[in-house]
Image (cartoon, rainbow, N blue to C red):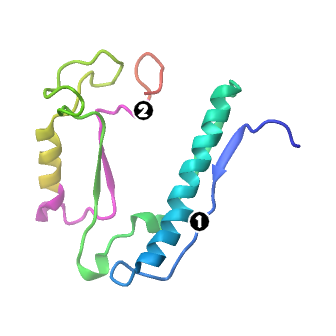
Amino acid sequence: ELGQVDIWINNAGIYRDVNYSSCRLRDWDEIMSTNIRGPYFATNRVANYFIEEKIKGVILNISSETGKVALGKYGIRSNAIAPGGVATKIAGRTTGDELSFPALGGRLITCEEIAELALFLVAPLSSCINGQVIYANEGNAIVIPSGNIY
């Protein structure tokens, strides 16, 4: 009715006044269905539409700071590591050798590097880091020298 879709924004979400220790399965299912499953499948559909129609569309996900809230008031820290390609049997390589596809570092991350980062994040030395996602990906999520986005 309005023509083609050029921009897709995932902005719907629900909030339930439950915390980690009081969340019931029913709460979890409702939250995940609305906040994760819905946007995932809607984005899947619109991405396929963009590809099929050759539309250089834009997808924007609106999140919430509560997605990163840790249990700090209880003295509990919560962080995440978001690795890029890691040299594992699943990746078909067990070393961080050079890759055939473009990447800033030109190699896979090693399991030892992820383990060292994990050790740092659980050590008292990193007690000031809380509610963060650490991207261990050789910078692959930024523009690489050829001007392409990886």
Counting residues from the start of the chain, the first of labels 2 and 1 encountered is 1
Query: Can the viewer see residue 25 in this picture?
Result: yes
The residues tagged by marks 2 and 1 sit, at their Cα atoms, a distance apart of 28 Å
Residue 105 vs residue 35: left or right?
left
**Residue 122 percent location from the top left of the image:** 15, 61
Q: Which residues are magenta?
A: 121-142
**Residue 58 percent location from the top left of the image:** 64, 38
Q: In the image, which disc is placed on residue 142?
A: 2
Of the 4 image quadrants, the one containing the N terminus is: top right
**Residue 51 percent location from the top left of the image:** 63, 28
| Residue with the mark numbered 1 | 13
The residue that appears at 18% across and 34% down in the rendered structure is 88
Instruction: Please say whether residue 99 is one of the residues in the magenta stretch.
Output: no
The residue that appears at 63% across and 58% down in the rendered structure is 11
Q: Secondary structure at mark 1?
A: loop
Circle 1: residue type:
Gly
Q: Secondary structure at mark 2?
A: loop
